[in-house]
Image: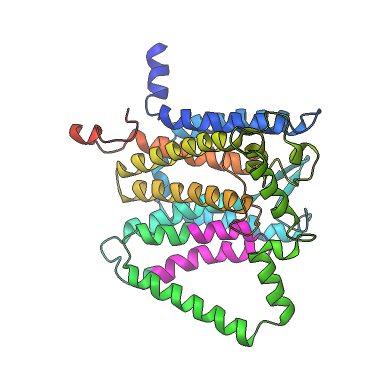
Amino acid sequence: MKKTLRGFFAHIDWWLVASVLPILVAGWFTMNSFTAENYFAERQLLWIAVSFAVFFVAAQVDWRFLKRPWVLFGLYCLVVTLLLMLFVAESVRGIQAWFLLGGVAIGPSDLASLLSIILLAKYFSRRHVEIANIRHVFVSGVYVFVPFLLIVLQPNFGSAMILAFIWFGMVLVSGIPKRYVLFLFGLGTCTFLIMWTLVFRPYQKERILTFVDPLRDVRGTGYNALQSQIAVGSGRLWGKGVGHGTQSRLKFLPEYQTDFIFAAFAEEWGYVGVLILLLCYGVLIGRILIISTRGATNFEMLFGMGLAIYFISHILVNIGMNVGLLPVTGITLPFMSYGGSHLLTEFMGLGILMSMRRYARATHRDNMKNEFFGT
């Protein structure tokens, strides 16, 4: 029995798990201090338990069947169908991004992000010999553009932005010549400038400017961003203490359990707490990148890279909008924000990575010493 359990957990990266646990605890404590009812904290404990179960089950599955074209095609059609079904779903806060099942909101856009990573990893791993051909930039972009467009039409700009970051990041790490990427970036910039000058009307320009700089309208769309900056700044060095965050407890800070949980955490734990939180995220990303470099094939390596890009995008965008450096987009903070869809997706992605670690190629003993918190 002991040997069976040891084999069950043998390929789990415990440094990675250890880096996630403090983030989960920080999110739970922050939610637990919001209200006396503790609704979000109680529900989050259930989601964490289910997500860990998904993580360990996924780690035992041999996911190499994802390389089969018909499997990927079927999953792609499933995700696109779910995104299309959202257009007849109930609107939540003006966005048709979730299915409401028994009071539980399920968002397929998270699943679309994970599938895009798998799809791009498969596409680029099969074409590494001819990767210098610019058509691979366009073809890979078409695969992502379909779910991207459906998510934009919800309208869910935050999730669409994450998809764009995943595609752009995986294009960069796939080995495609950077001149092609620069060409596309320049083409997109010129197209936007032409539309700004000749197509967009004054009210459309104002909407875009307010999106980029929410503080232009602090009584309207910029209110959330302003309150978030106040919360982060008021935490100072050591924070106000758990349960003493005035911005969140007095509900000046909206969506303090999801989009702005970083601001609520920073107010209560201060810059020292934020530094520890970022350190945990750093260890998480570091371990993912190390595991990806030891992938058995290019597919496993690119999947690990894509998963790291997914987490980095979420972290940078969420914290950026919390401190006023980026527009407010409704992006959650990994493993910390309240919710089941994103938490299940994150643990599923890590579970698939652990499964790939089971049949990873051996690394030379001398190189093992250079690993980040190597095991």
Which color scheme is applied?
A: rainbow
What residue sits 42% from the left and 27% below the top? 14
x and y, in percent, of residue 160 in the image: 59, 60
- Seen from the viewer's position, the closer of residues 329 and 244 is 244
Q: What is the quadrant of the C terminus in the image?
A: top left
Q: Residue furthest top?
A: 1
Count of numbered circles on the image = 0
Left/right placement of residue 365 relative to residue 238 reads: left
Left/right placement of residue 134 relative to residue 152 reads: left
x and y, in percent, of residue 107 in the image: 66, 49
- Seen from the viewer's position, the closer of residues 329 and 93 is 329
Q: Residue furthest bottom?
A: 198
Tell me which corner region of the image, top left, top right, bottom left or bottom right, holds residue 152.
bottom right
x and y, in percent, of residue 128 in the image: 29, 60
> How would you classify the magenta stretch by its main secondary structure?
helix
What residue sits 62% from the left and 39% below the top? 236
User: Is residue 62 at least partly visible in the picture?
Assistant: no
Whether the magenta-drawn stretch holds residue 221 is answered as: no
- Seen from the viewer's position, the closer of residues 3 and 160 is 160
x and y, in percent, of residue 123 in the image: 39, 59
Tell me which corner region of the image, top left, top right, bottom left or bottom right, holds residue 353.
top left
Against 235, residue 148 (above or below) is below
Tell me which corner region of the image, top left, top right, bottom left or bottom right, holds residue 136.
bottom left
Q: Which residues are magenta?
A: 137-165
Q: What is the quadrant of the N terminus in the image?
A: top left
What residue sits 50% from the left and 76% below the top? 189
